[in-house]
Image (tube, helix red, strand yellow):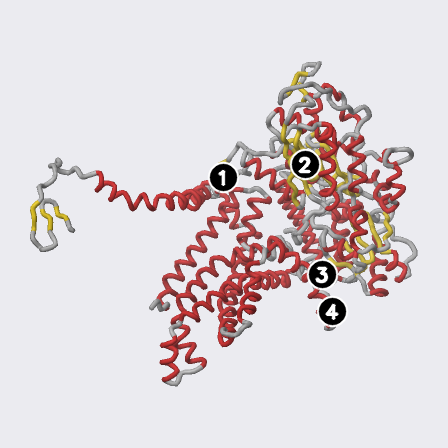
């Protein structure tokens, strides 16, 4: 039964007055009220602490490190202000890494968005077949295979003397190619390996999105004479736009990470920096050359670029997403 | 940037150090988990004192397999000293791990530092120089005097013995006898022009690759350019500069590039794929190290012959020594003492004898392998290793760049070399440019 101080409502609607509680000085509230006000903050405190320690603190510390000349170990840390950023601007290696990053984005993002969608549409008609589980497992398996293991296989494929790829080339009358030492071929290899590793995840997302399209809409459209492309473009795709947007945002964010894995195991950024992206350049500066300041400066530049891209996507792309 | 990663740096490591005669273990003094005072008043670790030390090392094929047995032998002498080992693929990886551990104030007690990084490690990481550890030990007066000075130099920085050379190897020529016969080549090439001619012949007669020269770092390249008269690192007047931009260096790198891009009798490869391709019989010759010889039975059993590293006519051969020096990074005194005991054991006749025969590494004193030396029989049974042993007098230090930008300096040379070898540019453009960058980095 509801209780209002001073009044108690009974089931029959009759009221009964209850004596009011002890008088409190004006402005003072009960402990319960304090706790009630604090409760939301207490609930989010663990998550805030986690995010603060593992995300925002490293970010703030990176800003500090980016203004130092330091190697992680020396007791001497020299403050250099923005000199690391200035040096990066004049560093041809960094400019090459940025150019490579742009290339990877321009090529891999469309590939990772469009090709899995096409494969999902091809698999859709056979989704009830007995083999559909096999298809999905085979196509998703690269995503779950460890890159270290996959690298051994890819190195064998790209091996310059008698690797699988060169054997095919030689058998068709071509000339041997040093896949990982030729600058253009090496870049293509990084794109191929990164795409192979990651497309399965987007494929699964698209399959789930296709599954989520209400049958009523499809049937209604079919009754109106829609078929094939019209069904996809006017019914399925608009309802898949939330998934499409998610795939777009996450692909742009993570494509750098995916390529980094391929670079670090297959080429280490070579030949002469022609496959390194900004993330690999950061790793090399920080963990191979121990130039903490420069590495932190690169990290901040990458952070700003990815943040800008993400904001752009939310402002200009999300307006085309249909959430209902 | 380096070539493919699986093993980016494969220095040939053969090392067995013959300890100076008279190395004896410290006298056994019962102690309760700590150090005791020896007769002279200096500290030494008692036999029953206990400690746990960590050891970071690079797992190059046979080295990785042999180390646990080496440690077992050590623990028979010092049962209460535990050695925890951590393996890494390359010396670069070890150095990175040590530096990261240093940042976390958790340095390992011991680590293998590649000879090319000795100066960098000595100038960057807190360590106990070997010379100081030896001075503190009253039981082994003059311990370092028993080792050849040119070998000790491999572990020195600014004249101080900072690390103890453990493993040694150099590049030499390994050839497939069958492919040379098929190509009508009667004798192994001895000079670089002969190598080029033989490589072309092998390619034309057999269809196989003529010669492979794996070089994920600048090790083989150093041998090539310095044997032609160039000097990768020139230390003079208290400073240092590089000579890779010299005409001799340009000529050597251009020669290498011609074999790849003009003759197409060679392929640029790394220390994993190169030896594998050779061991499968897909190449006539390879510039490699003794690791290929010792692992050959596992790789298909190609009929191999060996010859010393080729020369440029009458110019003297100069081959860089690959391998590692053991550094003591321990900061606590009992850890330092335990680590020092391990260093002494490894460099004792017992330790070195085992290390050489288990790994195929070169002894740091050639007399051990000659006459009635303790490992002479080993070399009699493995004649393929003699070519490498014969060039011991031609050893020069693998360049260890001074200053804090050593790794970057080496990377600049690797990138320049790769630009030439892939046909991106010529050596006359790339090498002087690289020399200028390197000189800036090393503070020339």
Q: Residue at x 62, y 42 (%)?
A: B440
Crowding at dot 4, Cα within 10 Å, few <14 / some 14-19 / many 20+, comes out as: some
**Residue identified by numbered label 4:** A170
In the displayed structure, would residue A44 be above or below residue A190?
A: above
Crowding at dot 3, Cα within 10 Å, few <14 / some 14-19 / many 20+, comes out as: many
Output the chain of dot 4. Answer: A
Viewer-closest of B50 and B403: B50
In the displayed structure, would residue A231 be above or below residue A3?
A: below
Q: Residue at x 77, y 51 (%)?
A: B252
Mark 4 and mark 1: Cα distance apart in space: 52 Å
**Residue A41 occupies which quadrant of the picture?**
top left
In the displayed structure, would residue A17 be above or below residue A204?
A: above
Residue mark closest to the camera, 1 vs 2: 2
Residue mark closest to the camera, 4 vs 2: 4
**Residue B36 occupies which quadrant of the picture?**
top right
Is there one chain holding both mark 3 and mark 2? no
Residue A160 is labelled as: 3
Output the chain of dot 1. Answer: A
Crowding at dot 1, Cα within 10 Å, few <14 / some 14-19 / many 20+, comes out as: many
**Which SS class for mark 4?**
helix
**Which SS class for mark 3?**
loop
Residue A68 is labelled as: 1
Residue B286 location in percent, x, y? 80, 53
Q: Earlier in the sequence, mark 4 or mark 3?
A: 3
Q: Earlier in the sequence, mark 4 or mark 1?
A: 1
Q: Earlier in the sequence, mark 3 or mark 1?
A: 1
Residue B118 is labelled as: 2
């Amino acid at each position: 039964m509801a209780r209002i101080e001073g009044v108690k409502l009974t089931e029959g609607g009759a009221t009964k007055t209850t004596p009011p509680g002890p008088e409190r000085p004006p402005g003072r509230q009960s402990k319960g009220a304090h706790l009630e006000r604090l409760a939301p903050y207490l609930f989010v405190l663990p998550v805030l602490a986690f995010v603060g320690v593992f995300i925002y603190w490293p970010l703030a510390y990176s800003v500090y490190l980016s203004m130092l000349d330091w190697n992680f170990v020396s007791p001497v840390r020299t403050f250099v202000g923005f000199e690391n950023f200035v040096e990066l601007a004049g560093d041809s290696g960094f400019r090459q890494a940025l150019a490579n990053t742009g290339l990877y984005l321009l090529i891999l993002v469309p590939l990772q968005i469009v090709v899995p969608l096409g494969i999902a549409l091809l698999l859709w008609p056979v989704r009830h077949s007995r083999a559909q589980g096999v298809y999905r497992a085979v196509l998703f398996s690269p995503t779950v295979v460890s890159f270290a293991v996959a690298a051994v296989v890819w190195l064998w494929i790209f091996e310059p003397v008698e690797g699988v790829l060169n054997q095919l080339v030689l058998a068709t009358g071509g000339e041997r190619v040093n896949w990982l030492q030729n600058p253009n071929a090496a870049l293509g290899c990084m794109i191929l390996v990164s795409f192979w590793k990651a497309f399965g995840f987007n494929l699964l997302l698209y399959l789930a999105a296709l599954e989520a399209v209400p049958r009523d809409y499809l049937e209604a459209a079919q009754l109106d004479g829609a078929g094939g492309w019209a069904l996809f473009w006017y019914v399925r795709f608009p309802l898949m736009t939330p998934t499409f947007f998610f795939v777009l945002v996450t692909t742009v964010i993570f494509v750098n990470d995916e390529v980094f894995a391929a670079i670090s195991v297959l080429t280490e950024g070579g030949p002469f920096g022609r496959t390194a992206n900004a993330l690999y350049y950061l790793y090399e500066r920080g963990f191979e050359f121990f130039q903490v300041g420069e590495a932190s400066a690169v990290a901040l530049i990458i952070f700003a670029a990815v943040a800008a891209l993400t904001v752009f996507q939310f402002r200009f792309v999300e307006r085309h997403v249909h959430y209902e | 940037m380096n070539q493919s990663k699986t093993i980016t740096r494969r220095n040939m490591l053969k090392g067995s150090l013959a300890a100076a005669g008279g190395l004896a273990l410290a006298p056994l003094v019962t102690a309760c988990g700590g150090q005791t005072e020896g007769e002279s008043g200096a500290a030494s670790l008692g036999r029953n004192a206990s400690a746990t030390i960590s050891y970071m090392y690079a797992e190059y094929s046979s080295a990785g397999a042999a180390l646990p047995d080496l440690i077992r032998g050590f623990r028979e002498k010092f049962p209460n000293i535990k050695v925890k080992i951590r393996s890494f693929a390359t010396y670069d990886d070890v150095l990175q791990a040590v530096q990261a551990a240093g940042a976390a104030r958790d340095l390992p007690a011991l680590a293998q530092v590649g000879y090319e990084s000795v100066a960098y490690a000595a100038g960057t990481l807190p360590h106990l120089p070997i010379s100081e550890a030896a001075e503190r030990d009253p039981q082994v007066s003059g311990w370092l005097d028993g080792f050849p000075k040119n070998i000790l130099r491999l572990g020195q920085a600014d004249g101080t013995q900072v690390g103890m050379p453990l493993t040694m190897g150099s590049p030499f020529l390994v050839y497939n006898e069958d492919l040379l016969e098929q190509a009508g080549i009667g004798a192994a090439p001895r000079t670089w022009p002969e190598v080029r001619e033989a490589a072309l012949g092998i390619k034309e007669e057999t269809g196989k690759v003529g010669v492979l020269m794996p070089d994920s770092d600048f090790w083989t390249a150093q041998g090539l350019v310095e044997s032609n008269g160039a000097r990768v690192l020139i230390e003079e007047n208290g400073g240092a500069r590089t000579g890779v931009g010299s005409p001799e260096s340009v000529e050597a790198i251009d020669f290498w590039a011609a074999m790849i891009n003009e003759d197409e009798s060679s392929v640029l490869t790394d220390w994993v794929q190169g030896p594998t391709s050779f061991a499968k019989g897909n190449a006539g010759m390879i510039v490699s190290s003794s690791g290929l010889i010792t692992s050959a039975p596992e790789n298909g059993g190609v009929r191999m012959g060996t010859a010393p590293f080729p020369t440029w006519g009458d110019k003297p051969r100069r081959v860089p020594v690959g391998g590692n020096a053991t550094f003591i990074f321990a900061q606590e005194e009992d850890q330092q003492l335990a680590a020092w005991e391990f260093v002494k054991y490894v460099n004792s006749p017992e330790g070195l004898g085992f290390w050489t025969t288990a790994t195929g590494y070169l002894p740091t004193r050639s007399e051990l392998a000659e006459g009635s030396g303790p490992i002479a029989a080993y070399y009699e049974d493995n004649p393929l290793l003699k070519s490498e042993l014969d060039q011991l007098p031609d050893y020069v230090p693998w360049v260890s760049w001074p200053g804090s930008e050593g790794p970057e300096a080496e990377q600049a040379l690797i990138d320049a070399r790769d630009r030439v070898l892939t046909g991106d540019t010529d050596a006359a453009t790339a090498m002087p440019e690289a020399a200028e960058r390197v000189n800036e980095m090393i503070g020339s």
